[in-house]
Amino acid sequence: MLTRLRLCSAAILLAPSAGLRLFAPSAGLRLRGFARPLATAAPSMSMVDAALPTLEDLTDPREWLEEVEGDKQIGWVKEQNADAVARIGEPSDKPLYGRLLEIMESDEKIPYIGRVLNGLYYNFWQDETHVQGIWRRCTLDEYRKAEPEWELVLDLDALSAESGVSWVWGGSTLLDEGPGVRKDRVMVSLSRGGADAKVSREFDLEGKEFVAVSDGGFELPEAKSQLSYKDRDTLLVGGVFGEGEMTDSGYPRSVWEWRRGTPLAEATKVYEGEQSDVSVGGFAYLDRGRRYELRYRSLTFYTSSYELKVGEAAWAPIPIPADANVGTFADQLLVTLRSAWLGHPAGALLAAPAERLMVAGDDAARSALLTPLFTPTETCSLEASTETKNYLVLSCLDNVVTECRFWRYADGAFSLERCLKGEVGLSPSFSAVDAETSDDLWRTSDGYTQPTTLALAAASSPDAAEALKALPAFYDAGGVTTQQFTAASADGTAVPYFLVSKEGLPLDGSTPTLLYGYGGFEISLTPSYSAGIGAAWLEKGHAYVQANIRGGGEYGPRWHQAALKEKRSKAYEDFEAVARDLISRGVTSPAKLGCQGGSNGGLLTGNMLARPTAGSTLFGAIVCQVPLLDMRRFHKLLAGASWMGEYGDPDTDDWSFLQRYSPYHNLDEATAYPPILVTTSTRDDRVHPGHARKLVSKLLDLGKGPSTFYYENIEGGHGGAANNKQRAFMSTLAYSFLEQTLASKNRGE
């Protein structure tokens, strides 16, 4: 079980793969013929107040917009939504909406398997009929068929209709009592409208029903909770005992043992961190028959302290660096480094016998136990891993091209058996079918122009795969090619990027081009198939670009750390360098170039609006989704305190550099900004919608209404949408915005 326990997983800003990039890429537009009415819901203010806050005067006259669901605030939101739809056009009336929805709800999508339990293969599915989704299962033989006969396990649409709540699937937590013991219970987590806070209820897999509290079933109230079965009658829980038991970041700061059949209020506290921690958690699990219990305190986003209990041994701290990630494989501890340790560089993956490492007396003794399974180079980093019963499969990136390495564990030692290398623009990946019982793997492969395929392979012979499923070509990729280039950043650093465009692209600056980026939290951007980008953008002869800027994980911890805190501007300089490179190559021109990013990428695109080296100099339009924009108050809003490890603490001297990349504080009346579309979700309880609201309000107050567009989905959580109809709506809104601006025949003339 290779885990990343540096923080509560919910605390991280949305990773690009979570949905923003795939079906809501967008650029912006300068819409002609539509006058923007003056906003009426906001308090009136003078032009002096309209410019606030500034770097000289931090007074914020728009804090009222931080009240998420107040009547006045929602009235303001609805007014902006109506204005955006009126000027861009009703998305659901456009042919693109129907096409994107058809793609999203296609029966030809791959039904990925989330769990294998008792020989049954579980899948969560959404389509036109099952808007909220269904949880279903079948046998492997059935799954091999083109149209499997599924057994319904849980229907969220029926549950939503019965309760009057729009439930969104939040996953399941298994009661695992070891090999040979039938799996019959899970905790199912559901959220209202896609929020991070979830309700968790015990579910009987045999009876396919929730276990009533009156029958001893566990049920946790709505919260940003953490939970794990310790045994059949004991649940480890956190985050459900009120604000007093939460960290400043809004996540659990204690672990409690709750016995079946007793009130939650009688649970016993067994572990506790500090309120200043990011999160605190604990769980128990079996790893290839070995029992582990682990407790952790995420001290910051990138540092943690761990305590481990192996079998019946006493609790003891794990003797590794605070910024390392830890996991287990059978009797081995797996340690991923973010800084150098005992002669091994940052980015290395090390294995050591768990029980022996826990009792090693000094660094020399610990060093003697370590076996390197991955050592980074200047071009190669560790991206991810998966495990089967006897194999550890590492996914590496070499100049952002995937390479998979297969380590076999036998007789207490790892041995490297084989490596599989991918190609530029293609991303093969592996995931375990059932790590407890077999060495089978799901093998997926896709690229910007290659629809995803799914095959079944053995870890011992991954090349000999049984083809199972494949996406159809949802868009015409004929003549579309993928090329990899590098751009020279301001300090000379080579920044790679992928260009997806028609072969023979005219190098005269005439091609509408969408530049996407993220650049944070050590998250890498790799090639993947997006029918939305293809159908709405590439088919029209436009170009799509994905930038691998610093702050990401494409080259391991060093690439990420190069853009941390006071060095954040490196990410923005990299993105600007890619934009300039595209323009200098003749791929596009400022009037035809749009940029897009969400979450941390929303901070990126917000800076592309506000930075004098970007703005209209480089971009004809900007799309900013579920963004972080107010760097003076981000740590006071929802989960924001957890990201101070990435950005800094604005209540300290860190403000001296934070202010330089706080878009909200760097807007002024005199600057002519490119058109911008800002989108967010009322139900986003990770990045506060106040960020987006306040930036848009300031732009309006500064007289930038004609080039400012805003839409806030009332549901959706940090992903921006709760179901396929909402996703298609938001995507169509964004693509229409893009088409009308960057692709207008008279654009830039």
Image (spheres, helix red, strand yellow):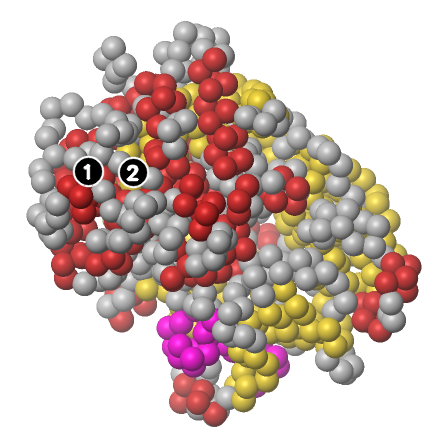
Q: Amino acid at mark 2?
A: Leu
Q: Determine whether, in the image, residue 104 is placed left or right of residue 239.
A: left
Residue 425 shows in this picture: no
Q: Is residue 589 above or below residue 340?
A: above
Q: Are marks 2 and 1 in contact (CB under 8 Å)?
A: yes
Secondary structure state at the residue bearing disc 1: loop
Looking at the image, which residue is at 12% across and 45% down? 46
Q: Is residue 307 above or below residue 414?
A: below
Looking at the image, which residue is at 42% across and 42% down? 661
Quarter of the picture containing the N terminus is: bottom right
In front of the other: 538 or 95: 538
Task: Give the magenta part as a residue range.
Answer: 220-247
Residue 314 shows in this picture: yes
Q: Which residue is mark 2?
A: 667
In front of the other: 683 or 215: 683
Quarter of the picture containing the C terminus is: top left
| Residue 120, quarter of the rendered image | bottom right
Q: Position of residue 560 (x, y in %)?
A: 60, 43
Q: Amino acid at mark 1?
A: Leu
Secondary structure state at the residue bearing disc 2: loop
Q: Determine whether, in the image, residue 646 is placed left or right of residue 443.
A: left
Q: Position of residue 585 (x, y in %)?
A: 49, 12
Q: Earlier in the sequence, mark 2 or mark 1?
A: 2
Residue 241: say if magenta. yes
Residue 223: say if magenta. yes
Looking at the image, which residue is at 45% across and 23% down? 579
Are there few (<14), some (14-19), or many (20+) residues within 10 Å of tag 1? many
Q: Is residue 378 above or below residue 582?
A: below
Q: Which residue is mark 1?
A: 702
